[in-house]
Image (cartoon, rainbow, N blue to C red):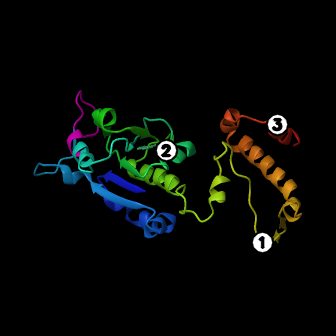
Amino acid sequence: MKVEICTLFPGFFSGPLESSILGRASTAKLLDVRLHNIRDYTHDKHQKVDDRPFGGGPGMVMKPEPVFECVESLNLEPGTPVILTSPRAPLFTQQTAVDLSAYSRLVFLCGHYEGMDERIQEHLATHVYSIGSYVLTGGEPATLVMLDAIVRLIPGVVGKMDSVEQDSFMEGLLDCPHYTRPAEFRGWKVPDILMSGDHSRIESWRQQQKLLETKRWRPDLLAQHQMSPAEQALLEER
Ligand code: ADE
């Protein structure tokens, strides 16, 4: 996957893109991230990327010209997603990550200051997403979060694909708890069922735990989940 990140702060990405799974994906040539400094697409002496808002008010607004020119310099194939980060947008979810992971090229536009001139969202971006109901200092951390969630779905990036398929959110539910050795740690024991070797009972326990965890922490997700009669029975068993 080729990823173009248009930003005023390319330095923000250098550590995270070189570390851990994103770094490995780049080394393995599964991921090719290019950083583009929007400021390089200004033409004035002061390299001005923002200006005061029309109509007055606090803060500055990012000017459209350098952002359009930055994206236009990429010569995108038609249909390439151009993703704008903004708190004024629908939420980025696991399903969004799944959908975007199918593309071979993505562009991220990192918003800043009070915002971006609205014509960028209307006429340049094809998608706009927020990563949560809070305001960040800029779009860079949001881009990193989205990119991380997308890249780990590319086949080969995470060792075992079935571990991805069993993740939280993949079936609209949170994941179940996991344990490893030792079987007893400071007097706290691993649930007996996991030591039983009975794989069908273990599977059923895990499914029940997924339902209970979702009910406890994210009842909003459980309310949207299409509950099968078997799942209903698992929930009522407790
Ligand atoms: N920029 C500022 N806050 C944001 C958020 N919550 N999501 C995406 N981009 C943002």
Residue 89 on image: x %, y % = 44, 35
Residue span colored magenta: 52-66
Mark 3 is surrounded, within 10 Å at the Cα level, by few (under 14), some (14 to 19) or many (20 or more) other residues, namely few
Kind of residue sitting beneath label 1: Arg
Element class at badge 2? loop
Residue 24 in view: yes
CA distance separating discs 3 and 2 = 31 Å
> What residue sits 67% from the left and 33% below the top?
224
Q: Residue at x 74, y 47 (%)?
A: 213
Q: Position of residue 113 (x, y in %)?
A: 31, 43
The answer for how far apart the CA atoms under marks 2 and 1 are is: 35 Å
Q: Is mark 2 within 8 Å of ligand 1?
A: yes
Q: Which residue is mark 1?
A: 181
Mark toward the start of the polypeptide (1 vs 3)? 1
The residue indicated by pointer 2 is 131
Which residue is more in the foreground, 73 or 86? Answer: 73
Residue position marked by numbered label 3 in the rendering:
232
